[in-house]
Amino acid sequence: MNAPALPPSTNLRDLISSEIKTRELLRALIVVGSFVAAYFISGETALLNLGLIAVSLLIPALRLHSPPKVIAWHYLAILVAFAALFLAAPVKPLFVVLTALAGFLAVAGTRYGEHLRTLGNWVFIPAVYLACEVREGVSESEALRHAGIIIVSSPVALALVCAIQIYDQRQSAKAATSFGPPASEWLLPASATAMAVFAAAALVEILGLAQGQWVMWSAASVVVGDLTASTDKLKQRAIGALVGVPLGFLAGLALTQSRVGYALAVLAATLTLISFSRYIVGFSLRCFFIALAASFAGGASGIAEERVANVIIGGVFGLAAVALTDIVWKRVARPSRPTKA
């Protein structure tokens, strides 16, 4: 006797529940949505960027069950890295070197605990992204004003994330006591990340690429292990960009410029950083909403090509760095052959 077929609505609910991290989504909506609401009230675009700092604090806090003390140190690291890169941006060689150093340190922390890679990633990503985003297409005085608002208002993000974490830990009595065992091989991925980010940042500065943070972010993102794992990560990112960006651009063609639509698209793009179980789904939707946000802002025609190209270019740098460091390491580690007497 055949089992009764499940109604389509049940299958859809099961698919959504397995794909979407409801708990994480709701918490991210609270912290990021607060800054979107503040943007609606004030009209200050700098407040939208605080959503990235908030979600960058929230992701490691939820994954690692971090206590508030760790969240506070993580917050301080983001601000220091952002300030250093922002101030160094006018001096291109210095910016390239500091960005590569930030990429190295993001991975080198695993020497003291493998879970520190998560914290390191979510220091590097917001620091690099905001340092580039805040200066994109504005004067020096406007960039300084924008950065000042982010720094002055950022304690609100810290307070929201700490409040959520304190509430969760009171409910579950679960808090991290360590960052896991030290990684036995940390120097190789740290060096590969530094090389990839250095090459990406140098290309961005030499060619003056728009939205260059995507190249640097992508270069670091694909350094996730051996060459096979890094290649798979690049494939997922390339597919996500090639699918998500054109669909977002096409959807934007039917819409008019809108401040409300722009803010909601930015909110949705930020939420994709934490809300999906499969990386390729989250990244594809992130690309979609970024292109849609650009459409609402009146600039989708250029951002579509830039997003796809920058993701792939950065990923290729990361892949090349992984391959190069692996080749060099094998040669260095190869035992020397005994010489004949």
Image: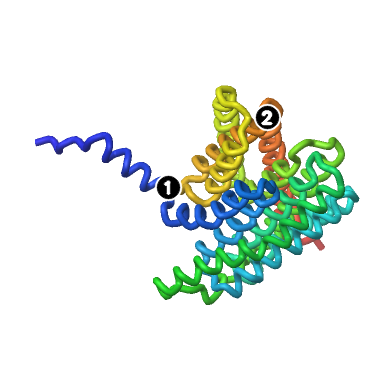
Q: Residues within 10 Å of mark 2 (few under 14, many from 20)?
A: some
In which quadrant is the N terminus drawn?
top left
Label for residue 298? 2
Q: Is residue 62 left or right of residue 87?
A: left
Q: Position of residue 45 (x, y in %)?
A: 69, 46
In which quadrant is the C terminus drawn?
bottom right
Q: Position of residue 236 (x, y in %)?
A: 56, 39
Q: Is residue 18 left or right of residue 329?
A: left
Q: Residue at x 71, y 65 (%)?
A: 77
Q: Residue at x 60, y 42 (%)?
A: 263
Q: How many badges with numbers are in the image?
A: 2
Mark 2 / mark 1, whichever is N-terminal:
1
Q: Secondary structure at mark 1?
A: loop
- Is any part of residue 337 visible from this angle? no
Spatial separation of the CA atoms under disc 2 and disc 1: 30 Å
Q: Position of residue 194 (x, y in %)?
A: 75, 54
Q: Which residue is disc 1 drawn over?
A: 20
